[in-house]
Image (cartoon, rainbow, N blue to C red):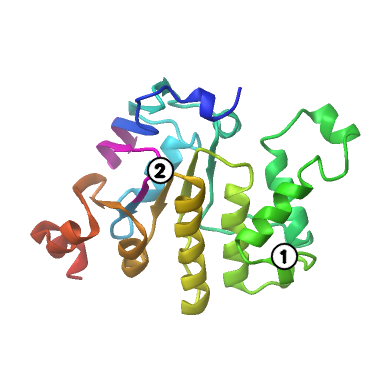
């Protein structure tokens, strides 16, 4: 069954309901509710320690929520392991790069795609590129990595590695991607390229994704809608213009 087939018609792509994660007496995520619609780019911002990464990890199976539920197209996925979510078309990036430095750009993309394609037997006895060579070439072209396709990832600049990391997340055509601080440490030139490519993959392929990020300009210029978190809770939700003008947001975050 394809990832698209897992999504019930009419349901939000992702729904998070009353999600909480407690570590002893600390409420890292506190009764958070939001939806992500198909084809949307949603941004989640907030100060360090506000619960953004913990929220991601609860959605994506790295942490078990204390309370609440998560559904994907109407199907409950709360607490499913990352491998189960991969099969349902959910992909992610991490704050720390997940590229393989001794593999080429092309090989990194093929390896990323193999997580979603075929069985162990087909990988052992099938074609060397697991039938993903054409898809990898398309992603290389889409993310403007052609001149680096045969270069080892470890020799790329940090910004180029970030671009490759994003390409790997989209390699298998996932229905939902969660990007964890994609702009972190990237210079302005590469950041403009990354933002342009993310906009393009949303526009041309209908990709749906959620971005958590500290770079305010990046989020505000990329996302359709923005959620602001503070102390584990949702402080505000709205369009970038609405968020910029919200007095509570200005006091808690933007004003610092």
| Image location of residue 26, percent across then percent down | 29, 42
**Separation of marks 1 and 2 at Cα, in angstroms:** 30 Å
Q: Nearer the viewer, residue 228 or 240?
A: 240
- Find residue 114 and name its label: none
Local SS, label 2: loop
| Image location of residue 198, percent across then percent down | 48, 58
Does residue 176 appear to the left or right of 169 in the view shown? left
**Secondary structure that dominates the magenta span:** strand
Which image quarter: residue 242?
A: bottom left
Q: Residue furthest right?
A: 125
Which residue is label 2 attached to? 39
Task: Answer whether residue 255 is magenta in the image.
Answer: no
Tell me the residue at 72%/40% (across/down): 114
| Image location of residue 149, percent across then percent down | 75, 64
Which residue is label 1 attached to? 153
Q: Which residues are magenta?
A: 18-42
Task: Answer whether residue 28 is magenta in the image.
Answer: yes
Local SS, label 1: helix
Does residue 225 appear to the left or right of 149 in the view shown? left
Pointer 1 local density, CA inside 10 Å: few below 14, some 14–19, many at least 20: many
| Image location of residue 199, percent across then percent down | 44, 58
136 over 244 or under it: above or below: above
Tell me the residue at 58%/48% (across/down): 170
The disc, 1 or 2, on the residue closer to the chain's N-terminal end is 2
Tell me the residue at 35%/26% (across/down): 11
* Front label number (1 vs 2): 2
Q: Nearer the viewer, residue 21 or 127?
A: 127
Which image quarter: residue 140?
A: bottom right
């Amino acid at each position: 069954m394809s990832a698209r087939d897992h999504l019930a018609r009419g349901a939000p792509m992702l729904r998070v309901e009353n999600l909480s994660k407690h570590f002893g007496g600390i409420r890292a995520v506190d009764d958070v509710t939001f939806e992500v619609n198909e084809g949307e780019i949603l941004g989640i911002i907030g100060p360090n320690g506000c619960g953004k990464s913990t929220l991601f990890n609860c959605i994506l199976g790295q942490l078990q929520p204390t309370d609440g539920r998560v559904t994907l197209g109407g199907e409950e996925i709360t607490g499913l392991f990352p491998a189960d979510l991969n099969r349902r078309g959910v992909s992610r990036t991490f704050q720390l790069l997940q590229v393989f430095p001794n593999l080429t750009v092309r090989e990194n993309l093929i390896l990323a795609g193999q997580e979603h394609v075929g069985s162990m037997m087909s990988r052992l006895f099938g074609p060397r590129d697991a039938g993903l060579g054409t898809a990898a070439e398309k992603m290389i072209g889409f993310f403007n990595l052609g001149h680096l396709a045969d270069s080892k990832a470890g020799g790329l600049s940090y910004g180029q590695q970030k671009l490759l990391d994003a390409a790997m997340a989209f390699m298998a055509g996932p229905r939902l991607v969660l990007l964890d601080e994609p702009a972190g440490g990237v210079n302005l030139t590469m950041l403009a390229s990354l933002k342009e490519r993310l906009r393009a993959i949303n526009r041309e392929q209908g990709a749906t994704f959620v971005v958590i990020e500290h770079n305010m300009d990046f989020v505000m210029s990329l996302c359709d809608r923005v959620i602001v978190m503070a102390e584990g809770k949702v402080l505000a939700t709205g369009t970038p213009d609405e968020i910029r003008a919200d007095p509570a947001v200005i006091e808690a975050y933007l004003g610092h």
